[in-house]
């Protein structure tokens, strides 16, 4: 059962490839934890509105918003705890981190009010992913929540999520930034000659002194290097903490299976805690659905006619073939991830678009062996 996978965990990071149901799985997990009595925050960095719509909310912002218990009681859920939800705004979160780490108001304003920073904060490799883990760290340190469930982007981007602390620290410690901070030697000649000419022309054309913007920005950012280094170390420690677990969500198709194996390998290499595998949207055979298609055709011929009976038999054969392929994919995942009892959720009717759908999904997660 999923409860056993999450026992004693404060942070659950849900990862996997796109289109496998990570967002709805995250919401269902959080809903179940909250119903059991925990105060839970579920965070998505998916720009789609799926999480808000599924929880019956008009919108989600960059701070957790409580899902009113009355919305849940209407679906027969007695909420013993609290469910909070938010959709991460990476830019706002990165700005907030700058404000927290700035040594004084002047440095904060020099960075946040800088025209170059407005573009750079979204372009630095790993900045958005670092924002996600920084928000996770902030919510964890806040102390208001018993559990936090994080819905990540597709898994190869989630690897950026794992690498973001190191990548951002490398940027601030890197040679390029240091050349701006201490422009000596070749850098000084570069800044004083060709670059100055280019910026001078741009100033005449636009009226904006970009050279001053660059200088002010990088010198101000230089005062934040130590803070970023400390924060990066803290978030890495949080991800590797025994109270954190990573759940990988996959579906039994070729690409999601490969992505799940790839991500699990990277988790292992990074020393991150793997908590279990959820195989979602699996085609499973029900009672009688493994009957021989020829026998089905013969049994239905008199009542349906041969042509219609043949179509039913063909549909049964296709279903059996798909179920067989899914079973092979699940066995591959079990072997590669060394996960003998993954949580397998059958393909449900229609898309999950509301609380009722989330409850159906959670019941499958809670009832599955694991």
Image: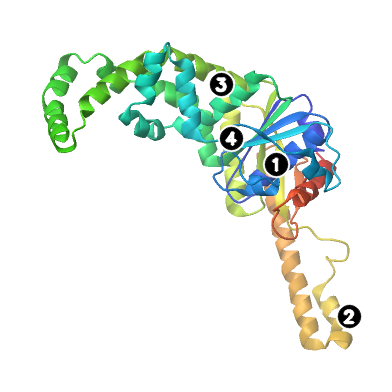
Q: Which residue is mark 1?
A: 27
Separation (CA) of disc 1 from disc 3: 23 Å
Give the residue at x 41% y 14%: 105
Q: Residue at x 21, y 31 (%)?
A: 208
Element at badge 3? helix
Q: Is residue 76 left or right of residue 251?
A: right
Q: Is residue 230 left or right of residue 78?
A: left
Kindly indicate the quadrant of the structure image that contains residue 118: top left
Q: Which residue is mark 4?
A: 265
Say the numbered circle drawn on residue 299: 2
- Which sits in the foreground, 276 or 336? 276
**Can you tell which mark lies on residue 235?**
3
Residue ID at (63%, 18%) = 141
Residue 335 percent across, percent down from the top left: 69, 41
Label 2 to label 3: alpha-carbon separation: 62 Å
Q: Work out whether mark 2 precedes mark 3 in sequence or the reverse, and give the earlier one.
A: 3
Q: Nearer the viewer, mark 2 or mark 3?
A: 3
Question: Badges 1 and 3: C-beta atoms under 8 Å apart?
Answer: no
> Which callout, 1 or 2, points to the residue nearer the camera?
1
For the N terminus, give its image quadrant: top right
From the viewer's perspective, tell me whether residue 117 is left or right of residue 185.
right
Few, some or many C-alpha atoms within 10 Å of disc 1 (few <14, some 14-19, many ≥20)?
many
Work out how far the residue at label 1 is from the one at label 2, CA to CA, in angstroms.
Answer: 44 Å
Q: SS of the residue at dot 1?
A: helix
Q: Nearer the viewer, residue 205 or 251?
A: 205
């Amino acid at each position: 059962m999923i409860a056993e996978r999450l026992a004693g965990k404060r942070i659950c990071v849900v990862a996997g490839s796109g289109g496998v149901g990570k967002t709805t799985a995250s919401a269902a997990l959080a809903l179940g934890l909250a119903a059991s009595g925990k105060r839970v925050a579920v965070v998505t960095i998916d720009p789609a509105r799926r999480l808000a719509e599924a929880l019956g909310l008009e919108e989600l912002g960059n701070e957790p918003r409580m899902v009113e218990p009355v919305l849940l009681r209407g679906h027969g859920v007695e909420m013993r705890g609290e469910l909070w939800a938010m959709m991460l705004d990476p830019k706002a979160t990165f700005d907030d981190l700058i404000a927290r780490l700035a040594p004084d108001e002047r440095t904060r304003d020099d960075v946040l009010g800088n025209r170059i920073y407005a573009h750079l904060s979204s372009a630095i490799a790993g900045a958005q992913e670092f924002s996600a883990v920084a928000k996770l760290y902030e919510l964890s340190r806040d102390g208001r929540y018993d559990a936090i469930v994080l819905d990540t982007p597709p898994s190869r981007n989630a690897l950026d999520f794992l690498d973001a602390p190191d990548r951002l620290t490398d940027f601030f410690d890197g040679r390029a930034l240091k050349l701006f901070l201490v422009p000596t030697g070749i850098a000084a000649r570069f800044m004083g000659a060709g670059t100055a000419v280019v910026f001078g022309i741009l100033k005449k054309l636009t009226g904006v002194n970009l050279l001053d913007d660059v200088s002010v920005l990088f010198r101000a950012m230089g005062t934040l290097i130590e803070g970023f280094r400390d924060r990066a170390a803290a978030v890495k420690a949080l991800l590797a903490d025994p109270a954190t677990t990573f759940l990988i969500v996959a579906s039994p198709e070729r690409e999601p299976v490969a992505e799940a194996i790839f991500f699990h390998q990277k988790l292992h290499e990074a020393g991150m805690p793997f908590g279990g595998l959820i195989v979602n949207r699996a085609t499973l055979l029900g009672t009688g659905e493994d009957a021989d298609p020829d026998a089905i055709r013969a049994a239905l011929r008199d009542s349906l006619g041969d042509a219609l009976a043949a179509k039913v038999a063909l549909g049964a054969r296709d279903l059996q073939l798909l179920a067989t392929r899914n079973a092979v994919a699940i066995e591959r995942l079990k072997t590669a991830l060394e996960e003998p009892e993954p949580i397998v959720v059958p393909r449900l009717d229609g898309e999950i678009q509301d609380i009722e759908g989330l409850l159906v999904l959670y019941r499958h997660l809670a009832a599955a062996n694991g």
